[in-house]
Image (cartoon, grey):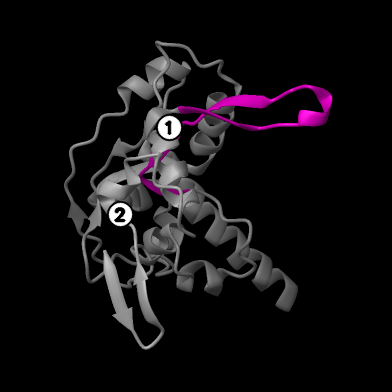
């Protein structure tokens, strides 16, 4: 594809270009090459010729997670936990009375499960039966967030610390059972993620009250 701008005319790769490893004569060469190798799931790179090792073989795996929820240790205050533009922030705002104006797709993975999944994928020896793509997503209905809040945090709800807001769910069709089977793991239920996010917020809130008293 040829694009003309104030910087002049330049050839840009198209999707068709990306599917061919022969496309190696432009400054974009690494993009189609790496993308095609990823699609193929295998490849090799030059490796230590001086030691007599011409190439190092490798395989590439793709992990496709849903929204990632859990404790965000990078957040240093209760207010930041609510206002941060992150998936835990979206979840927390739904129990802090702040409506979400757009639907969020109903697929999630717990942050601890995602970390474990990456480690298990890295430790696998690839073979013909090993999948090259791993879905990491459990289906959820975000109406369950407030049900968990009422059940687990009735005192905070009664005190007005937690208040209900709208978090609409965009239904999706997603099946990660093959990932669970291939890696020998079971994804945590959504309730665990909700509790981790809310617990983290309440802990920060209590710590701030204690430090100011």
Question: Mark 2 or mark 1, which is nearer to you?
Answer: 1
In which image quadrant can residue 125 be found? top right
Do callouts 2 and 1 mark residues in contact (Cβ within 8 Å)? no
Residue position marked by numbered label 1 in the rendering: 188
Residue drawn at point x = 46 percent, y = 16 percent:
184
Quadrant, the N terminus? bottom left
Disc 1 element: loop
Residue position marked by numbered label 2 in the rendering: 146
The reply to whether the magenta stretch includes residue 169 is no
The reply to whether the magenta stretch includes residue 57 is yes
User: Position of 29 compared to 74: left or right?
Assistant: left
User: Position of 7 compared to 74: left or right?
Assistant: left
Q: Nearer the viewer, residue 94 or 123?
A: 123
User: Position of 28 compared to 164: left or right?
Assistant: right
Q: Which residues are magenta?
A: 42-69
Residue drawn at point x = 46 percent, y = 21 percent:
185
């Amino acid at each position: 594809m040829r694009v003309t701008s104030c910087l002049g005319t330049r050839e840009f790769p198209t999707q068709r270009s990306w599917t061919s490893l022969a496309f190696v004569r432009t400054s974009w060469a690494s993009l189609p090459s790496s993308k095609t190798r990823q699609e193929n799931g295998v490849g090799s790179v030059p490796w230590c010729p001086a030691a007599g090792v011409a190439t190092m073989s490798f395989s590439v795996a793709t992990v496709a997670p849903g929204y990632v929820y859990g404790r965000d240790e990078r957040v240093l205050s209760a207010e930041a936990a609510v206002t941060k533009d992150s998936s835990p922030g979206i979840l927390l705002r739904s129990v802090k009375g702040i409506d979400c104006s757009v639907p969020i797709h109903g697929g999630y993975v717990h942050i601890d499960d995602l970390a474990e999944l990456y480690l298990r994928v890295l430790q696998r020896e690839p073979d013909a039966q090993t999948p090259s793509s791993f879905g990491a997503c459990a289906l959820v209905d975000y109406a369950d967030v407030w049900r968990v809040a009422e059940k687990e945090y009735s005192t905070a709800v009664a005190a007005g610390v937690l208040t209900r807001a709208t978090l609409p769910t965009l239904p999706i069709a997603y099946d990660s059972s093959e990932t669970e089977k291939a890696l020998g793991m079971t994804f945590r239920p959504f309730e665990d993620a909700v509790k981790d996010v809310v617990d983290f917020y309440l802990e920060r809130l209590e710590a701030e009250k204690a430090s100011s008293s």
